[in-house]
Image: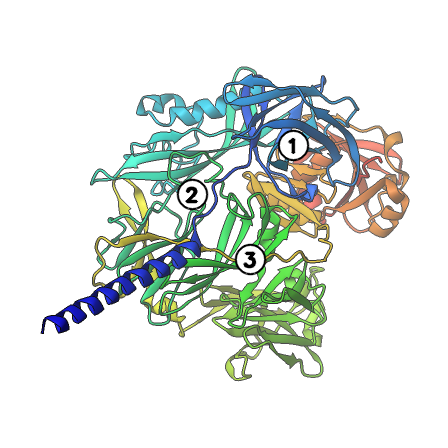
Amino acid sequence: MKKVLTKLGVLLLIFILGVIGFSSFMNKETTENKMDMEEASLPVLSMMYEGQEMNRMYGYAQEMQVDFMRDSLTPVGTDKKMTVSILPYDHKIKNLVYEVRTSDGSKVVENAKIKNFEENGSAQTATFALENSILMNQEYTLVFTLNTDKGSWHYYTRVIQRTGLNVDKYLEFVQSFSSKTFSKDNVGELRTYLESDDTAVNNSFTNVNIHSSADMITWGSLAPAISRKGVPTIKDINETTGSLTLTYYITAKDEEGYEEYYQVDEFYRMRYGDTRVMLLDFNRSAKQIFTGNEMSVSSGKINLGVTPKNVQFAASQAGSVLAFVQQGDLWSYNTSTNKMTQIFSFREGRDTDDRYDYSMHDFKIVRVEENGDMDFVFYGYMNRGEHEGYTGTCVYHYYSEQNVLEEKFFLPTTKSYEFMKRDVEILSYVSTDDLLYLMLDNSLYQINMQDKTYKVVKEEIAENCFVASNTNRHVAWMEEMDPLQTMNIIFMDLETGEQKRITADEGTKIRAFGFINEDLVYGVARDGDIVVDATGSLRYAMHEVKIQKFSGKLVKDYQQDGVYIMDVDIQQGLLELKQAQWNVDRYTEIPSEHIMNNVKNAEDEVISIATATTVRQANITRLIFSEDSRNKNPLRMETKLMVNENDTVLNMDIKEKALDGYFVYAKGSLAGIYSSPAQAIRAADEMMGVVLNRNQQYVWERGNQKTKVTLNLDDIPEGFRSASLDTAALQESLGDTGTVLNLTGCTLEEVLYQVSAQRPVIVSLGENDNRVIVGYDGYNTLLYDPASGETKYMGLDDSTKAFEAAGNVFISYIETLPE
């Protein structure tokens, strides 16, 4: 018996040791296969202006396309001196090379190397002066290359030489105004800058503006404190106005004493008067950074706090797993296990520097599985990690059981985040067999992420000829690449790769408008109904609108006798059909028809977004889910990165094309790209922005025009003195010296900017009666009549009425930059 017990004891000991050894081996294998994301390491640069830090710049690991890099604008005085500050972060600086290029990057104006720096606390500074002349009032790109003992990186800002800019006044005002909002004692002073009225809702800290109440401007009942100060960034500045942004971080205490953390973005548009700065526009958005703490889930709700309502989210089919994006982080919540997992974040606590919080990136959730696995696309600037300093598109797969994140693919780009974001938002889809579909430079690409091969599915797709479903699984494009003359629509399922053709019947044209769920919405118009009516407008009048599944099954066919659909607007499952009837010689608008989508997405059945109003935080946002059990005090988890020995990077052998068109920048960011200068100007005027062309020349600026101008007739190009409305002939007369701008549809006030910029404007007063605007003052326009050769004044009110009656037909031009 004793021997038996001894043998059993030995066997038990061997078993225990075996289990321990096996577990140790497995844990070692698991640990070795996982890692934390590498810390941020790149130095940070800033420009200095009279001792004030501004225009912070973050490092890029590769040279970017300079015409896409418009994060900041650095003014240069007549002495052309500038001071740059460097935070080295454990790097030993060898030298700093600067290069001034034309705004489109095509020509290097000057370059030089800086070797001597001065210590300034934790920073090192250097002052230098440009040696070569640069044009006044013309933007250039300033590229820094910082060479250190650990590598070289590139930094970008724009420079402009202008006089009377009041930069120091604007920088001081922004810092002062922002800091004063944290004390109710400053309400009286702040009111002098505000335009508080009933247009502001005053119920959300995500949208505070110049029309908000003084109480909301001073943070209501939130009682925040500054956690990390911001550095102002100049976005645009001229002799009349300046536009600056400021990003900083605040903390506040909730009712239970827990600390909340917020990112605050402010925009200022200012003008300096005789004695003080006048605030023309102000916007502030505070967004709470989600932490996933024990207070984040309660009563079937995920409490996101102060954040906009347009939350990106997705759910598994049964709704047990929710994925959502908050302030640059990706989260998931498992209702069954009560686990709140931070899937992806660059942040590393709150005591780090702003390299970790730099928010030039975003996500697109592709799919969420019932077991918690997830596929998603991450795109933008890489703050840290293996691809630190690159801008690009990453595809990740999250393994829930192992709580590990695998990078499957990375595609770098030389475009800035603002521009690449437009491509990714148009289309980015990952199929279950590892095919990635992306829209790159108006072409649809299919990329095999396993073997790093790719092909073009469709080239040269016009932006208004392509539509995609919300999930991006289904897409469609108009084969003729003309929305008004299309006979064929290609309908494609990106999961299977299958394509189907929808062909118009003889004598008709078809036009794709978008998707309801995964069903295509398109209209049908008879050739005879596509006409130029008595108003001179081309009208695409459709007699029928169809909703069709990929299988070919028709879901809806809408048509009414004598009723034409002029346009289709799709928003959140609702179709608005803008209708008209033919009345003698024109289409006359009648009330719109609305078609409701009665079939909801699966995720809409299990999750929804709601807002609630609180005393302290004003409006807050919540994700509401159907499951209301085991949802208190969730277990908070963070993922690890899988060590991937395979090369995930694809450097595509394609030349990224320069974008043509007119670029509108407003409130500190790219607001739109337009093919028509008139459309761009109208949009910029509404948003208080600016318009630039492909060469980054100012086509139009809100509020930056002289009070009185008279042009010299001898300086006006001969073609424009003739007041012809033939734009082709006008362009031929200009040759290579300029580009004609058709500004038809703009207002007189808008086109006077061109006269202020020493450019004549041709205007129509009716049939065969044209003039040239060659000047103006506070009361009149000055009009040149080529028929008589006389120049006469016309009152501003009379001019406005006469030009509007003739259709507001205006034509001007912009000069070609000298080589």
Amino acid type at image mark 3: Glu
- Left or right of 586, for residue 306: left
How far apart are labels 3 and 1 at the CA level? 35 Å
370 relative to 706, above or below: below
At a point 54% along the width and 83% down the height, the residue shown is 551
Q: For mark 1, give the secondary structure.
A: strand
Labels 2 & 3 near each other (Cβ < 8 A): no
User: Which residue in the structure is indicated by mark 3?
Assistant: 425
Instruction: Write the residue at 56% across / 30% down.
Output: 91
10 Å crowding of disc 1: few (<14), some (14-19), many (20+): some
Residue 546 placement, left or right of 763:
left
| Res. 525 visible in picture | no
Q: Earlier in the sequence, mark 2 or mark 3?
A: 2
Query: How many neighbours does mark 2 have within 10 angstroms: few (below 14), some (14-19), or many (20 or more)?
Result: some
Q: Earlier in the sequence, mark 3 or mark 1?
A: 1
Q: CA distance from mark 2 to mark 3?
A: 24 Å
**The quadrant where residue 440 appears:** bottom right
What residue is disc 2 on?
A: 347
On residue 147, which mark appears? 1
Regarding mark 2 in the picture, which secondary structure is present there? loop
Residue 181: x and y, percent? 38, 27
Tell me what residue is drawn at x 40 percent, y 74 percent: 598
